[in-house]
Image (spheres, helix red, strand yellow):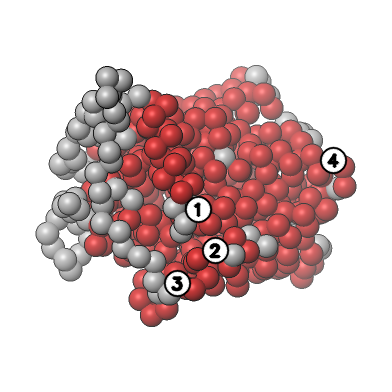
Amino acid sequence: MAASPLSNDPSAPPGGLRKLLLAQTASQFGFRLMTLTLPILAVTELHASPFQVSLVAAGQTAAFLLLGLPAGALVDRVRKRPVMVFCDLGRCLVLAGLPVAWAAGVLSVGYLCGAALAVGVLTVFFDIADQSYLPHVVGREQLVPANAKLASIEQVSGVAGPGVGGLVIQLATAPLAVIGTAFGYLWSAVWLLRIHDREPRPARRPGARLHRDIAAGMRYVVQDRLLRPIVLCSTTMTLCWSIAYAMLLVLLAKNLAVPAGTIGLLLTAGGAGGVLASAAAGPLIRRLGDGTVVRLSVLVAAPFTLLAALTGPGWRLCLVAVANFAFAAGVVLYNVAQVSFRQRSVPPELLSRVNATVRFFAWGARPIGSLCGGTAAELIGVRGAVWIGAAGTSLACLWLYLSPLRTLRDLPLRLPTAEPEPQSSAA
């Protein structure tokens, strides 16, 4: 049975959703600041090499690869909102220590990598709990509009975050810009605490074991003929764009000597594309079907990333903005459709583990991509690494068109079913 939303008013977002949106606004704004400030901090203040920059970028998402699967099994056993609050407060404390270390003269690339890894560990648990908490807040029937609102929040933060972050870095240095990230996570925790939670405690499952729970989530994803190609597509896009993105920042900040404020403005174009796409996601899915939107969003948008590799002085800097605008718009449409499908079709008792498995592959590819990008930059140059990543991103849609998804207008709704209890040893 679908979880009941926290409000019965169909004309407005439930009270819980409004508070969740406000929490996400602060959290996403902080995240956008972090993804810009940490690499630029490594380049400008610590004079890091391209490979060292890739290590900092990899540290932010390495935990998805290291802890993603057990995190999902653990989150399935507890209430989700307390996990999110704890992770927000932890991220705030870790990032607040960076300006202190910089002022004390002890900040190093290793320290920065350690902080990025610690934030990444907390982000793993937060994101898995977040995606599993949403169906409880709004009910499964309202997942598409709710995910569209959350995507809009994320993309508005994408517009404001890099622009504000670049300006703050330019005026007050990168270490001080990290303070904005820490404050964003603190503000997110405050709003989560204000949700009047009716979330029930998950029932204990006799015979549950961590390795069995992980295997159940993995098995669901691998055996599902529709989820599997979506996960493969997401993983390929994430891996390849991670190769390109970290080195694109190096190309702009170091090779082309573009000011941090200008870099921030170029990256805000991605947020603008995402904002427009989030507004159009619901109508497009109703008109074309979520299966069609999943396919076309990647097919049309991903090749625009090739423009980023063509950037250069003068007007060619605009190619970065165009690439970010188109790719972000496509990713938002893709995510609203495929995440809503996953949230409504996966049994509730498996949802955290399935989300963790998806994040393990898709987000776990980020640190691998960042490290590959740094290695490629050392071998063939920074621009060559951007070309390789953009080319791979453009081909990610092949997974969708070589699967049963190629003929589906609408993705099916599968009613939640109880997970079979593990058999006892006596049986």
In screen coordinates, is 68 left or right of 55? left
Q: Earlier in the sequence, mark 4 or mark 3?
A: 4
Task: Give the residue at mark 2.
Answer: 403
Residue 6 appears left or right of 322: left
Q: Is residue 333 left or right of residue 283?
A: right
N-terminal label among 2 and 3: 2
Label 2 near label 4: C-beta < 8 Å?
no
- The answer, for residue 346, to whether it is visible in the render is yes
In the image, which disc is placed on residue 408? 3
Q: Which residue is mark 1?
A: 228
Q: Which residue is rendered at x = 44% and y = 41% of the image?
A: 219
Kind of residue sitting beneath label 3: Leu
Label 1 secondary element: helix
In this view, the residue in front, 279 or 180, is 279
Work out whether mark 1 precedes mark 3 in sequence or the reverse, and give the earlier one: 1
Residue 281 visible in the snapshot: no
Residue kind at label 4, given as amino acid type: Glu
Task: Give how far across and how far down residue 80 sits, in percent.
Answer: 29, 37
First along the sequence among labels 1 and 2: 1
Q: Which mark is residue 378?
A: 4
Percent position (x, y) of residue 305? 68, 63
Q: Residue 64's x, y, as percent?
A: 52, 36
Q: Are marks 1 and 2 in contact (CB under 8 Å)?
A: yes
Mark 4 and mark 3: span between their CA atoms?
43 Å
Q: Residues within 10 Å of mark 1 (few under 14, many from 20)?
A: some
- SS at badge 4: helix
Q: Report, in whole angstroms, how far the alpha carbon at label 1 lies from the one at label 3.
A: 15 Å
- The correct choice, above or below, for 98 with respect to 229 in the image is above
Please, is residue 155 above or below residue 290 in the view? above
Looking at the image, which residue is at 61% across and 55% down? 237
